[in-house]
Image (cartoon, rainbow, N blue to C red):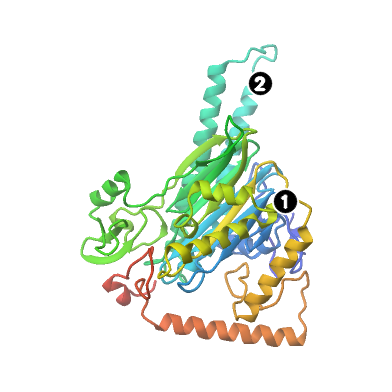
Amino acid sequence: MGGCVSTSSSTCSSRSNGEKVSPECLGISMFSRKRSRRTFSDHVIALKHLSSIPNRIFTNGKSRTSCIYTQQGRKGINQDAMIVWEDFMAEDVTFCGVFDGHGPHGHLVARKVRDALPLKLMSFLQSVESKGNGSAADCCNENPGSEVVDPDKDQVNTDKVDTQRREAFLQSYKAMDKELRSQPNLDCFCSGSTAITLVKQGSNLYMGYIGDSRAILASKDDNDSMVAVQLTVDLKPDLPKEAERIKQCKGRVFALQDEPEVQRVWLPFDNAPGLAMARAFGDFCVKDYGVISVPEFSHRVLTERDKFIVLASDGVWDVLSNEEVVDIVSSAPTRSSAARILVDCAAREWKIKYPTSKMDDCAVVCLFLDGKMDLESDNEEEQCLSSAALQSNHSGIAAESDDGHNSEPSLQRNTTVRSAEENDIYKRAVAEADQETAMTEDQKWSGLEGVTRVNSLVQLPRFSDERQGP
């Protein structure tokens, strides 16, 4: 249809649906020093081509170095989203993310962030790397005969890179929240999403995160035993620093009587929305009262002792400890099944620990740091996943497509033409999904429906029903 954003438009614009496109076709090549300013339409075109990017997965499956899996809970539509993007900017760079939506449109917010945030982060990382290349060129012009390594100077350069990476994460998160606020067809006033994102570049691990999704690292200790290292902090209102900021902005922080262990954020003039996190994308009803989308940033240098990283939404961490997660993943029969087995274990724990509660959505990303995935039993694993997909399709649950809509209830194939029978199935599935969505939107949303353990959002503010769309 339209051309891609690239200096070589003749090559990129000729791509047909279903063909692979390179990141350069999105106007995001890391090697171009001079880039024209991208317009809103350019961004839309880039998003449309995401499904054709190689080495980018966002549905249940595996890649060269990772496996990902998500399962809907008992609270309604699955509001979790996840992504692994290998060869992100370069061959040795991998991007991973988990996003947990909440509120009436939380699933749409999470998917929007999943699709748009990596592109924004890539753009800002390219910008800082361009500046860094300039600095490196200046360094190369110094006296070539000097081979003395200055540790102080080396530390200064490391600190400079950290500062640049931190700025890229901060700016991309800021731009993401700004885009959500300006979305005409996505109401983020009382809906939002967490985000936990990492960029692995060689042995360097850069992380940015908001909300209560979590990442842990499995590493070998001196006794060669696997231990869990928590890489992130659950950014909830019970943290003194977070609560202080919210109260200074006139927001209120307190727990409900029937769940004294869960601190929530409330408007100063209404017992709503009762947000169970201190930082999130969206949730603009409380953005003036201390809830922010500024990420925490961290940099870690990985070693040979470090084996794998697990990113997961709170549906996993509510019932499993860090150590239990490491044990489950490390004991999985195949690496490609680790994420699915972890979600299955979490589902069982929900039934055991909270039999009267509705299980939360679960999303898991397992990234193996040695860059290897097992080859044996792959056929068996694929058959297992195919059976699960067929069962979910027979139960009327359609798989999610890249644009956030429900796709045809059939196994994904590398074809661009459907048979007449498949078209009929597809049309019926879309019609049923649209009808279900319309029924859901007509009903008054409440986070307290049914018996649940912890809801990210309790209820909508009284004035939200009267709020006019932009």
Q: Name the residue rendered at 32%, 76% in the picture.
A: 465
Which residue is under mark 1? Answer: 64
Residue 132 location, x and y as percent?
Answer: 59, 33
Residue 423 location, x and y as percent?
Answer: 71, 85
Residue 66 location, x and y as percent?
Answer: 66, 51
Q: Name the residue rendered at 29%, 45% in the picture.
A: 240
In the figure, residue 442 lies in which quadrant? bottom left
How packed mark 1 is, by other alpha carbons closer than 10 Å (few <14, some 14-19, many 20 or more), is some
* Quadrant housing the C terminus: bottom left
Classify residue 214 as left or right of residue 463.
right
Foreground residue, 136 or 152? 152
Which residue is under mark 2? Answer: 141
**First in sequence: mark 2 vs mark 1:** 1
In the figure, residue 19 lies in which quadrant? bottom right
* Quadrant housing the N terminus: bottom right
Classify residue 448 as left or right of residue 116.
left
Q: Which mark is residue 341?
A: none
Separation of marks 2 and 1 at Cα, in angstroms: 39 Å
Judge whether residue 315 can be spotted in this image: yes
Q: Amino acid at mark 2?
A: Asn
Q: Amino acid at mark 1?
A: Arg
* Above or below, comparing residue 302 to residue 140 in the picture: below
Classify residue 284 as left or right of residue 335.
left
* Above or below, comparing residue 324 to residue 378 in the picture: above
Label 2 element class:
loop
